[in-house]
């Protein structure tokens, strides 16, 4: 452990590992941390979900199970981050036989957990976060351990280190340490060491102030994908076959993600093509402008920035992440917004639509969620969450199945007269009272 804080640690070893980590196109550095932009989209949804969670706890409407709670929405958005957070929800599943984590039946523990989330949500300084973690540790809530850090990471990524079994194994292997998975004190020790390592003069320019990058490095070491002296015997003796299976599984995951990303881009390109045929200006989410489809660059087919008159400055960041927007060329009025949700959170897409609707006075914009055919029930279920039923009473959304859009795209391009033509291929979704 001392080695982690010692400025004389083997910098060459670490820099070589980091270089391997960054060069490997199938490492979580490239598939998650700097990947297709879905990581950045998750922050907004998770932050909103955390607020819903502590608000529901304070109002007494949280419930006595993980399922169907606002906490489930938060963990669903986190686990959608794939590899590095694939098991993040397990620690919060209600286990009735052993009655953990004890935040569902025990009202006082539930209140403490809600206060912890609210305090972290409102915090602006590192010491405030660490104080709250120490308070939660002292509360000794059965079954509620440092897996909570995976939630708080998405509120404060430069202060909080994600935490799971693979990361702990990676840290222990790298530093010959004995960090334990369920100990808050061990977590805080590990976090402090990683913050120190991340700011070391030989390392700080190689990764990121966002602690997700160094967590990803530990994850790859702990998973056996990157070898160090501390995990070689484990990998050779016990994990060789498992590592090979993991590598094949990771490769398949990458291929599946590439396929999903390709289909997402095809839908965006189709919406761009239709919008341009209708003589409208088209804007594509800033994190997707580098994409190409059918030999054409989305950046060359769309306007580079949202006109200042289109949205309020406060909402510009969120609305700038909406997948496709159509605008009238003369007035710069946004007339249609499309959020494409191939495999990512419907919840976060609705939040961006909500931001758009309430940033435009007397909004008459047509809002569409574009998703695979088999996600229609999920769209309807999310729209009927209590928070959306309250906030979207004056806003209606429509759902466009992928199959309908692709089937009729050429007809829409050829025969469409204005943006209202999209109502022909959409299904209206209304929040139920």
Image (cartoon, grey):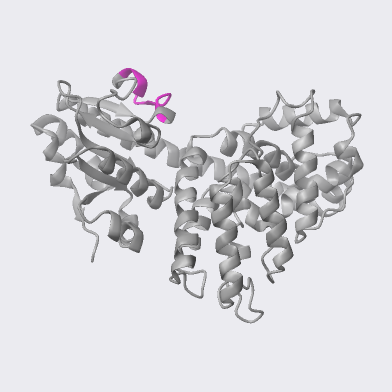
Q: Quadrant of residue 428?
A: bottom left
Quarter of the image containing the C terminus?
bottom left
Give the magenta part as a residue range: 288-300
Specify whether residue 296 is painted magenta: yes
- In screen coordinates, is 30 left or right of 355? right
Residue 381, above or below 17: below
Q: In the image, is residue 266 part of the stretch drawn in magenta?
A: no
Q: Residue furthest top?
A: 300
Residue 354 at x, y percent in the picture: 31, 46
Q: Which of 65 and 231 is in front in this view?
A: 65
Q: Which of 407 and 55 is in front in this view?
A: 55
Q: In this view of the protein, can residue 296 be seen by the observer?
A: no
Q: In which quarter of the image is the N terminus?
A: top right
* Depth order, front residue of 259/380: 380
Position above or below: 396 against 98: above
In the rendered image, residue 273, in percent from the top left (x then y), is placed at 24, 28
Q: Is residue 272 above or below residue 85?
A: above
Query: Residue drawn 84% across and 39% down?
Result: 228
Q: Residue furthest bottom?
A: 97
Q: Which residue is drawn at 57% across and 70% down?
A: 110
Please state the horizontal and vertical placement of residue 349, each as a whole percent of the image: 36, 46
Is 376 left, or right, of 219 in this rendering? left
- Residue at (85%, 51%) from the top-left corner? 234
- Image coords of residue 225 (percent x, y): 73, 42
Where, by quadrant of the figure, is residue 161 drawn?
top right
């Amino acid at each position: 452990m001392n080695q982690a804080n010692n400025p004389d640690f083997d910098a060459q070893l670490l820099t070589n590992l980091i270089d391997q980590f960054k060069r490997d196109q199938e490492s979580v550095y490239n598939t998650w941390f700097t990947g297709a932009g879905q990581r950045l989209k998750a922050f907004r949804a998770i932050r909103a979900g955390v607020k819903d969670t502590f608000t529901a706890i304070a109002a007494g409407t949280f419930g006595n199970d993980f399922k169907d709670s606002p906490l489930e929405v938060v963990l669903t958005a986190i686990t959608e981050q794939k590899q590095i957070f694939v098991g993040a929800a397990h620690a919060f599943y209600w286990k009735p036989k052993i009655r953990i984590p004890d935040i569902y039946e025990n009202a006082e523990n539930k209140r403490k957990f809600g206060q912890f989330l609210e305090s972290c949500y409102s915090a602006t300084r590192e010491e405030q976060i660490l104080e709250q973690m120490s308070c939660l540790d002292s509360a000794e809530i059965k079954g509620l351990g440092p897996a909570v850090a995976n939630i708080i990471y998405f509120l404060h990524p430069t202060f909080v280190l994600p935490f799971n079994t693979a990361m702990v194994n990676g840290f222990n292997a790298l530093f010959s340490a004995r960090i334990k998975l369920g100990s808050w004190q061990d977590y805080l020790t590990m976090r402090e060491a990683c913050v120190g390592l991340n700011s070391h003069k030989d390392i700080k320019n190689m990764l990121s102030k966002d602690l997700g990058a160094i967590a990803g490095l530990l994850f790859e070491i702990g998973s056996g994908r990157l070898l160090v002296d501390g995990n070689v015997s484990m990998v050779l003796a016990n994990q060789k076959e498992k590592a090979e299976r993991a590598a094949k599984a990771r490769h398949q995951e990458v291929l599946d993600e590439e396929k999903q990303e390709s289909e997402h881009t095809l839908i965006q390109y189709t919406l761009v093509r239709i919008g341009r045929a209708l003589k409208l200006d088209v804007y594509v989410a800033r994190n997707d402008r580098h994409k190409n489809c059918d030999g054409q660059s989305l950046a060359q087919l769309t306007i580079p920035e949202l006109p200042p008159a289109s949205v309020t400055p406060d909402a510009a960041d969120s609305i700038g992440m909406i997948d496709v927007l159509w605008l009238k060329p003369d007035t710069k009025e946004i007339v249609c917004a499309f959020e494409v949700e191939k495999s990512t959170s419907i919840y976060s897409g609705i939040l961006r639509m909500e931001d758009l609707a309430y940033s435009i006075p007397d909004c008459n914009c047509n809002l569409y969620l574009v998703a695979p055919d088999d996600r229609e029930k999920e769209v309807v279920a999310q729209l009927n969450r209590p928070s959306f039923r309250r906030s979207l009473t004056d806003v209606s959304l429509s759902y466009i199945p992928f199959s309908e859009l692709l089937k009729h795209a050429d007809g829409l391009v050829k025969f469409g007269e204005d943006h209202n033509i999209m109502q022909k291929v959409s299904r209206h979704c209304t929040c139920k009272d």
